[in-house]
Amino acid sequence: MLWKNTRDKFGCVTISIHWLVALTVYALFALGLWMVTLGYYDGWYHQAPEIHKSIGCILFAVMIFRVIWRFISPPPKPLLSYSRFTRISAILAHLILYIVLFSIMISGYLISTADGQPINVFNWFSVPATLTDLPDQADTAGMIHLYLAWAVVILSLLHGLAAIKHHFIDGDITLKRMLGRSTD
């Protein structure tokens, strides 16, 4: 398999990042829902948020790389069978997913650093608190974080359903390309 994308195929870097981000987002979503149910005396009460924040910071770096990679290795050309509506919808869907993902991570950062403390990422490095004096920063960012997390899950499910529709109804190779399968 090729590293970079071609005019017709996704390369292994793009495919790997796509599925790594998807799995990580769902894992963080599940961890986030679970950790807010924990009581103060639960053993995971302090550990779960630290893991959530650390993975979120690493995901932010991966997403920055993902954006840069799109410029280094542009995605394959849309299939000729795609309608104009499908082409525009795909561009908008990807753009919205990127914006929502980055917004989730920024709101998570604002929650985590509202008290002026840095985020300690798995004891490897710290992300400093740079913006700490917004009114009700943690509460406002927390509400935004929650709604955007639900939004990205719903949008990604629609994204997945669109890929399944392409595969089973349209009979095209859209899904096969993102699974790294041969499109010949």
Image (tube, rainbow, N blue to C red):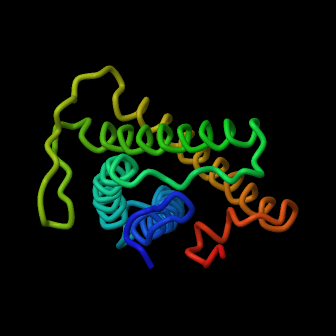
- Judge from the rendering whether residue 100 lies leftward or rightward of residue 135; answer left or right: right
Residue at 77 percent of width and 51 percent of height:
81
Q: Where residue 134 sits in the image (x, y, percent)?
A: 29, 22
- Judge from the rendering whether residue 178 lies leftward or rightward of residue 170; answer left or right: left
Q: Which quadrant of the structure image shows residue 2?
A: bottom left
Report the front residue among 122 and 142. Answer: 122
Q: Where residue 156 sits in the image (x, y, percent)?
A: 63, 53
Residue at 52 percent of width and 57 percent of height:
7
Q: Which quadrant of the structure image shows residue 107?
A: top left
- Judge from the rendering whether residue 123 lies leftward or rightward of residue 104; answer left or right: left
The quadrant in which the C terminus is found is bottom right
Q: Which quadrant of the structure image shows residue 1?
A: bottom left
Residue 181 against residue 166 in the figure, above or below: below
Q: Is residue 38 visible?
A: no
Residue at 29 percent of width and 59 percent of height:
58
Residue at 12 percent of width and 59 percent of height:
125
